[in-house]
Amino acid sequence: MKALKILVILIFVSQLSMAQTTKGPIIKFDKQSYNFGEITQGAKAEVDFIFTNTGNEPLILSNVRSSCGCTVPKWTNEPVKPGEQGKITVKYDSNRIGSFSKQITVSSNANNGDVILLITGKVNPKPTEAIPYTKTDASGTPIAQ
């Protein structure tokens, strides 16, 4: 009986400690991945990742880096107050043909640590334009049609 009382007290205390609010900033993204699908070479390939500071202290992004130079992130430089939102805009260089999968690592002072964002898609070559055909004579002079 005594062991049961101790067990109940331990469970109660552990529940109380878990229910306490964590201090500090917490970063929460609306999405952590984006698929561009199939895009044409040279087309605009840009996406916004919106995040919210769900913590109780200002959130500061210290670094946002991509897995290669073909992906360029721009981000909110000001501290994001609790309950407010920030944005990371990611541009991909769509002049590279083929499938791609790129990671963006977001480092901040958030309690939940670094966050990995992912962009994927496939770049198809630009369609080639047909060269107009003109009939010519043996010397290469165009023939009126």
Image (cartoon, rainbow, N blue to C red):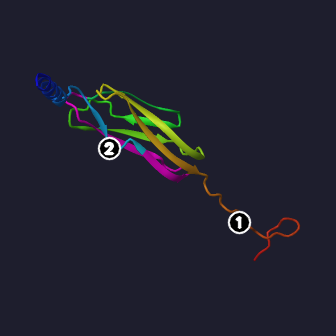
Where residue 106 sits in the image (x, y, percent)? 38, 31
Where residue 101 sits in the image (x, y, percent)? 51, 41
Q: CA distance from mark 1 to mark 2?
A: 49 Å
Where residue 111 sits in the image (x, y, percent)? 28, 27
Residue in the foreground of this view, choosing between 4 and 14 = 4
Apparent side of residue 94 relative to residue 64 in the rendered image (left or right): right
> Residue 26: which numbered mark, if any?
none
Apparent side of residue 55 relative to residue 140 in the rendered image (left or right): left
Q: Is residue 41 visible?
A: no
Question: Mark 1 is on which residue type?
Answer: Pro
Q: Residue at x 25, y 32 (%)?
A: 80
Magenta stretch: includes residue 143: no
Disc 2 packing (10 Å; few <14; some 14–19; many ≥20): few
* Labels 1 & 2 near each other (Cβ < 8 A): no
Question: Mark 2 is on which residue type?
Answer: Asp
Q: Is residue 102 visible?
A: yes
The mark nearer the N terminus, 1 or 2, is: 2
Apparent side of residue 112 relative to residue 15 in the rendered image (left or right): right
Q: Which residue is mark 2?
A: 30
Q: Residue at x 84, y 65 (%)?
A: 140
Return the residue found at the far bottom.
145
Residue in the foreground of this view, choosing between 94 and 2 = 2
Q: Residue at x 56, y 49 (%)?
A: 123
For residue 131, which quarter of the picture? bottom right
For residue 23, which quarter of the picture? top left
Quarter of the image containing the C terminus?
bottom right
Where residue 1 sits in the image (x, y, percent)? 11, 25
Disc 1 packing (10 Å; few <14; some 14–19; many ≥20): few
Helix, strand or loop for disc 1: loop
Compared to 104, does 62 lie above or below?
above
Q: Residue at x 28, y 30 (%)?
A: 78
The residue segment tinted magenta is: 34-58
